[in-house]
């Protein structure tokens, strides 16, 4: 297992780096560590059985018996090798539905059986010369490699799976070496007269198993699945069926091994059944929560649809997504996050009927299947119970936690006649529930598919926008309220789509955060800001301090400060020229972690600011812990100066007074009327920005604006500015 981890992980990292360099993306998957371990166990058992078979066949005297044992042994050994391969395939999960072509899958098994026949016939005949073992090992290695890549081809991915040539060659070399060594070991250990024969065969089986699994996972590492790939075999031979075949194959290997070892006791038989059941269970259940996974869920929904079609009833599919789980996982650690998910899984199973099911299909996504409904509105009662249960406080390691959920509901047959359509439509309804404020539910409507499709299109085109220079920055000036002199500017990201036109940040930023592309976009903003600062410095314009808004996703990236520091210093920009902003909500998700990150930024020479202050759930006392340079008051409080003058003035006065005591500057956002500006001046607020003073300017226009101020000014203006991607 350690060998596999060391050998495979760097390959994944190189793949991601290569994809980033070439401007392409590859679809990533995840490995189930227990199934990887089980594949190693199956390989070990198959190897040990091969050693036992070679000894038994070598001892046979009658040619007819030898032929029968060779054929039977080749099939049993082929099943073992083939089962190990497909358990390894099952351990690797892609974010798309996967199936297998029957004829190609059968061909891969025949290759495994043929290779096994060659191995057994080679080691059980006379003396084994070096030439003979080299030729047989080469043919056997090519056969094993052929079995592996034939099995991969059974997935029939579109676009076709691309393979890294040198890794493929390495896997073939490993396969040949992994064949020559077992042939030699099996030949040396085929007689039963040696001392400690069982121990030697067990040791040899371990070496053979490591070699076989090493070749398999090296071959898996050579595969590159393009983003957006689909499996053309998804409806031919589904993964659930393959899981049953693999379970039966593994059972054959285990029974055969135990039979040759002569362990016929009832306890070992029970252990065999438990091992097989565990293998089947692991292939159909979630490792963390022990809830059914997508494979078992799909089979359950298909059975429920057949029953409902006969009885004229309906099925409700509820897709549950936990609101705010990522914050808990990133802030308190994966261990707390795992315990939290287990508790939520337990609560989801409460108050369900006997025939209903709850499954986990993703990190923070669950599916509840409610069958036998005569009225789809009945699902609302279950949804209300789920929302109420999940909103209850959860205490883990002394930490009180609370989340809500967004739920999408799709009903069979009204909203779809197959599993994938129902899940897709439930996901669209769930996303609409999130857009409507979260902690609620939505029944699927046809218009939701259009919204979900638009989000997918945005996520797809965002990558092209980064590569083709469709993104740009505009700058909105900020002014000192006392004399209306320029103090800096806030930069806003813009996207000019070649077909759609201008896309507002409020549309594409949430899509980027949902897909994780916001990290790459944030890096682009930092690099673009540094490029502009260097350009303005070269032209002798006033030195401007830029503050860049970090998204919640970006703020939780490991080694964030080191990565940003490398970008800024690599561009030749001094760190004091840059300020970073986080919203109050992000800051309060984990105050201790936020304080540590702010201090690390400041130790590198960067200034920090709290944006949208007053919209989160912190108290003013937290400002003393954070020790930021600026706080930006949300436009909601500024608008209150016109609507509710007394209350708005009282709140702003308290913020300004505390900020002054902590040596912080206060910036008012969204100033749009003269009345607001005058009242901010009366409250001694430091700076203001808004359409009353200036609209956002494209980078070229803002550069001209700075040039004009530099020419008109007799002294140096104060030059602090703020930039955020939104």
Image: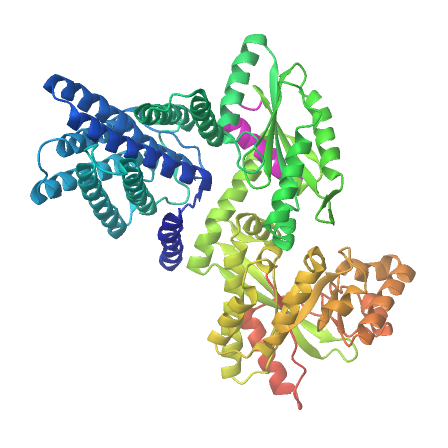
Q: Can you give x and y, in whole percent of width and height, for residue 279 in the image?
A: 44, 30
Instruction: State left or right for residue 517 relative to residue 51.
Output: right
Q: Is 520 or 175 nearer to us in this picture?
A: 175
Above or below, 123 relative to 521 = above
At x 29%, y 34%, the residue is 48
Between 611 and 458, which is closer to the camera in this rendering?
Answer: 611
Tell me, yes or no, whether the highlighted magenta stretch contains residue 22: no
Spot the residue most to the bottom.
714
Residue 105 appears at what percent x and percent y? Answer: 29, 28
Main SS, magenta region, reads helix
Query: Can residue 257 be seen in the rendering of this structure?
Result: yes
Against 465, residue 191 (above or below) is above
Q: Which residues are magenta?
A: 415-433
Decide if residue 234 is on the left or right side of residue 448.
Answer: left
Q: How is the image coloured?
A: rainbow
In the rendered image, the quadrant that contains the C terminus is: bottom right
Residue 169 in percent (x, y) is at 22, 49
Q: Horizontal placement of 56 versus 580: left or right?
A: left
Q: Where's residue 614, x and y in %? A: 78, 59
Question: On the picture, is 563 further left or further right than 264?
Answer: right
**Is residue 95 visible from the viewing direction of this image?**
no
Residue at image point 58% right, 73% down:
702
């Amino acid at each position: 297992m350690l060998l596999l981890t060391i050998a495979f992980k760097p390959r994944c990292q190189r793949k991601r780096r290569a994809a980033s360099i070439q401007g392409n993306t590859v679809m990533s998957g995840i490995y189930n560590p227990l199934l990887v371990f089980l594949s190693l166990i199956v390989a070990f058992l198959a190897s040990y059985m091969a050693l036992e078979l070679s000894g038994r066949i070598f001892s046979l005297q009658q040619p007819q018996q030898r032929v029968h044992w060779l054929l039977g042994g080749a099939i049993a050994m082929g099943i073992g090798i083939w089962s190990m391969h497909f358990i390894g395939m099952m351990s690797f999960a892609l974010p798309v539905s996967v199936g297998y072509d029957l004829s190609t899958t059968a061909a891969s098994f025949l290759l495994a059986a043929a290779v096994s026949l060659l191995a057994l016939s080679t080691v059980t005949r006379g003396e084994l010369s070096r030439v003979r073992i080299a030729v047989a090992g080469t043919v056997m290695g090519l056969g094993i490699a052929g079995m592996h890549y034939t099995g991969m081809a059974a997935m029939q991915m579109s676009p076709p799976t691309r393979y890294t040539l040198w890794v493929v060659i390495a896997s073939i070399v490993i396969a040949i070496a992994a064949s020559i060594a077992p042939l030699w070991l099996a030949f040396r250990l085929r007689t039963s007269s040696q001392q400690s024969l069982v121990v030697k065969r067990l040791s040899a089986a371990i070496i053979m198993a490591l070699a076989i699994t090493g070749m398999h996972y090296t071959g898996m590492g050579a595969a590159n699945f393009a983003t957006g790939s689909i499996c053309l075999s998804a409806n031919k031979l589904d993964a659930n069926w393959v899981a049953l075949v693999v379970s039966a194959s593994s059972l054959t290997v285990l029974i055969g091994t135990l039979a040759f070892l002569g362990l016929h006791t009832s306890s070992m038989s029970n252990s065999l059944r438990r091992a097989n059941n565990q293998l089947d269970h692991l292939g159909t259940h979630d490792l963390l929560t022990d809830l059914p996974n997508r494979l078992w869920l799909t089979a359950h929904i298909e059975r429920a649809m057949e029953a409902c079609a006969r009885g004229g009833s309906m099925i409700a599919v509820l897709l549950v997504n936990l609101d705010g789980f990522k914050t808990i996982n990133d802030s308190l650690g994966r261990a707390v996050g795992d315990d939290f998910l287990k508790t939520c899984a337990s609560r989801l199973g409460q108050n369900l009927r006997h025939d209903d099911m709850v499954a986990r299909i993703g990190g923070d996504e669950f599916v509840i299947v409610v069958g036998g409904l005569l009225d789809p509105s009945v699902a609302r009662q279950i949804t209300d119970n789920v929302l109420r249960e999940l909103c209850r406080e959860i205490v883990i390691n002394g930490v009180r936690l609370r989340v809500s959920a967004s739920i999408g509901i799709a009903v069979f047959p009204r909203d779809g006649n197959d599993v994938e359509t129902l899940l897709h439509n439930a996901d669209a309804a769930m996303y609409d529930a999130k857009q409507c404020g979260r902690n609620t539910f939505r029944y699927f409507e046809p218009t939701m598919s259009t919204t979900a499709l638009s989000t997918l299109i945005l996520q797809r085109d965002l990558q092209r926008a980064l590569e083709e220079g469709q993104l740009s920055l505009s700058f909105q000036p900020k002014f000192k309220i006392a004399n209306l002199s320029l103090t800096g500017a806030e930069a806003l990201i813009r996207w000019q789509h070649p077909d759609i036109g201008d896309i507002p940040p409020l549309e594409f930023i949430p899509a980027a955060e949902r897909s994780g592309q916001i990290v790459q976009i944030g890096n682009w903003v930092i690099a673009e800001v540094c490029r502009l600062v260097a350009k303005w410095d070269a032209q002798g314009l006033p030195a401007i301090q830029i503050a860049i808004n970090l998204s919640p996703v970006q703020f939780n990236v490991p080694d964030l400060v080191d990565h940003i520091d490398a970008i800024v210093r690599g561009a030749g920009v001094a760190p004091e020229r840059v300020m970073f902003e986080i919203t109050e909500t992000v800051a309060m998700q984990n105050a201790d972690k936020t304080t540590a990150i702010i201090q690390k930024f400041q130790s590198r020479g960067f200034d920090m600011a709290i944006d949208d202050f007053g919209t989160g759930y912190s108290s003013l006392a937290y400002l003393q812990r954070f020790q930021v340079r600026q706080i930006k008051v949300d436009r909601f409080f500024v608008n209150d100066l016109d609507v509710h003058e007394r209350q708005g003035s009282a709140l702003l006065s308290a913020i300004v007074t505390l900020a002054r005591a902590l040596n912080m500057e206060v910036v008012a956002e969204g100033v749009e009327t003269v009345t607001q500006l005058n009242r901010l001046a009366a409250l001694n607020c430091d700076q203001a920005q808004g359409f009353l003073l200036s609209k956002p300017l494209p980078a070229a226009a803002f550069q001209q604006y700075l040039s004009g101020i530099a020419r008109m000014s007799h002294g140096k203006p104060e030059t602090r500015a703020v930039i955020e991607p939104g």
